[in-house]
Image (tube, helix red, strand yellow):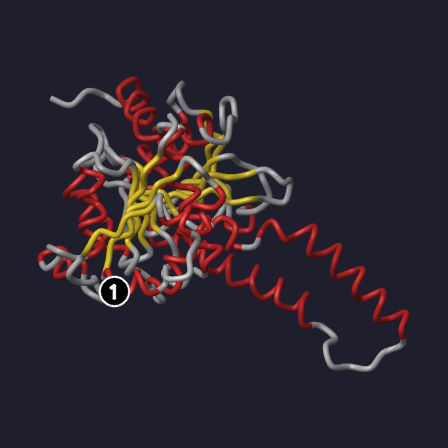
């Protein structure tokens, strides 16, 4: 694949074009094969491109949209009133084949519903799941899903998530026979909700999945598993709690000791320690892995954090590039056909 075209919902998120447009330019500068369709209010987008490099703007096109789906809108109402919105137009560009993926920082529920409506789930998938790849302490990566697309998930859905996560670990992270675990309140087989225990029984008997059992939340960044599966409620709370702790830790490294008078050697020692700690844990910065892929669709959709800054949104665009080039939807479809029982 040479040319790669992505549709960007330029109006979504807390900051809209103020973040998405500079991030788009950053992405274009880092990939000469990338072309972007910026969907939104032409006047708002154009004003931010006035001083942009003409060589980069030659590889983007502004696609007009009439409205924006509010971040706090109820998904059902947002979907009914979505025609002409930047999010829906961006997804329609993927459906029509004009773009190979969509990236949005907008309303998660609306993005989930519209993606399912326009792009349709793969055969064997009840509902798509939000997935991200997190760095861990061993400097490897762990696939985690679901991160909020489905507040409640039954055992069949958890098994589907496990299969999709294993495919991503194999195809994107190049892990042979990835270890798959279920996130639970304990490692004992008797613990957890019925849906988790039932999913565990199915995964344990599957020859296609390297299931290793339950893991607790404190193992999220330890590298004990390659794929960690949970429902969307637990996954979303877990991810945001972890991100908040990491951000606080990294901010303390930057601010500790500022404005205080110390002996020169204490100042030097503090700088050395902070530099080493930042190097050791800097890869855990949430901005570097922003973007959750909506797995289980017949196309590629990336959900960025609503509060993403420029570098974080650029990371989401990069994730969309990788998902398209690795043909993630096609590879998941092939695995589902081989593993899941055929429907009547």
Residue at the image position 39 percent from the left and 39 percent from the top: 34
Q: Is residue 190 visible?
A: no
Q: Position of residue 342 (x, y in %)?
A: 19, 20
Which residue of the protein is positioned furthest toward the front in this rendering?
54
Residues 4 and 214: in front is 4
Query: For numbered disc 1, what is the local secondary structure?
Result: helix
Residues 106 and 176: in front is 106
Residue at the image position 33 percent from the left and 56 percent from the top: 105
Residue at the image position 53 percent from the left and 47 percent from the top: 220
Q: Residues within 10 Å of mark 1 (few under 14, many from 20)?
A: few
Horizontal side of residue 237 vs 139, given as left or right: left
Q: Where is mark 1, residue-wise?
A: 43
Residue at the image position 21 percent from the left and 35 percent from the top: 121
* Quarter occupied by the N terminus: top left
Q: Identify the image quadrant of residue 324.
A: top left
In the image, residue 18 sits, relative to residue 285, either above or below, namely below
Q: Position of residue 64 (x, y in %)?
A: 19, 55
Horizontal side of residue 31 vs 89, given as left or right: right
Q: Is residue 76 visible?
A: yes
Q: Position of residue 117 (x, y in %)?
A: 14, 43
Q: Identify the image quadrant of residue 171.
A: top left
């Amino acid at each position: 694949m040479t040319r790669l075209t992505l549709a960007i919902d330029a109006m979504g998120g807390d900051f809209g074009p103020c973040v998405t447009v500079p991030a788009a330019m950053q992405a274009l500068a880092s990939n000469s094969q990338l072309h972007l369709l910026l969907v939104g209010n032409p006047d708002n987008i154009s004003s931010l491109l006035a001083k942009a490099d003409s060589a980069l703007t030659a590889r983007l096109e502004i696609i007009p949209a009439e409205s924006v789906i509010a971040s706090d809108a109820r998904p059902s109402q947002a979907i009914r009133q979505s025609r002409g919105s930047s999010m829906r137009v961006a997804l329609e560009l993927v459906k029509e084949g004009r773009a190979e993926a969509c990236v949005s920082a907008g309303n998660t529920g609306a993005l989930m519903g519209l993606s399912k409506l326009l792009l349709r789930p793969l055969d064997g998938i009840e509902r798509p799941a939000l997935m991200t790849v997190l760095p861990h302490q061993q400097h490897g990566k762990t696939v985690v899903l679901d991160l909020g697309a489905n507040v409640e998930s039954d055992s069949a859905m958890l098994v589907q998530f496990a299969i999709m996560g294993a495919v991503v670990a194999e195809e994107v992270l190049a892990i042979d026979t990835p270890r798959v675990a279920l996130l639970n309140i304990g490692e004992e087989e008797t613990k957890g909700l019925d849906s988790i225990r039932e999913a565990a029984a199915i995964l344990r008997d599957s020859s296609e999945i390297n299931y290793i059992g339950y893991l607790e939340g404190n193992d999220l960044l330890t590298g004990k598993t390659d794929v960690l599966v949970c429902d969307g409620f637990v996954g979303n709370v877990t991810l945001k709690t972890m991100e908040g702790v990491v951000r606080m830790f990294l901010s303390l490294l930057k601010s500790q000791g500022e404005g205080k008078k110390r002996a020169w050697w204490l100042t030097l020692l503090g700088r050395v320690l902070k530099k080493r700690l930042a190097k050791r844990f800097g890869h855990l910065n949430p901005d570097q892995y922003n973007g959750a892929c909506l797995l289980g669709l017949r196309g590629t959709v990336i959900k960025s954090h609503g509060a993403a800054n420029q570098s974080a949104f650029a990371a989401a665009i990069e994730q969309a590039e990788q998902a398209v080039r690795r043909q993630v939807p096609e590879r998941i479809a092939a695995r589902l056909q081989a593993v899941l029982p055929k429907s009547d």
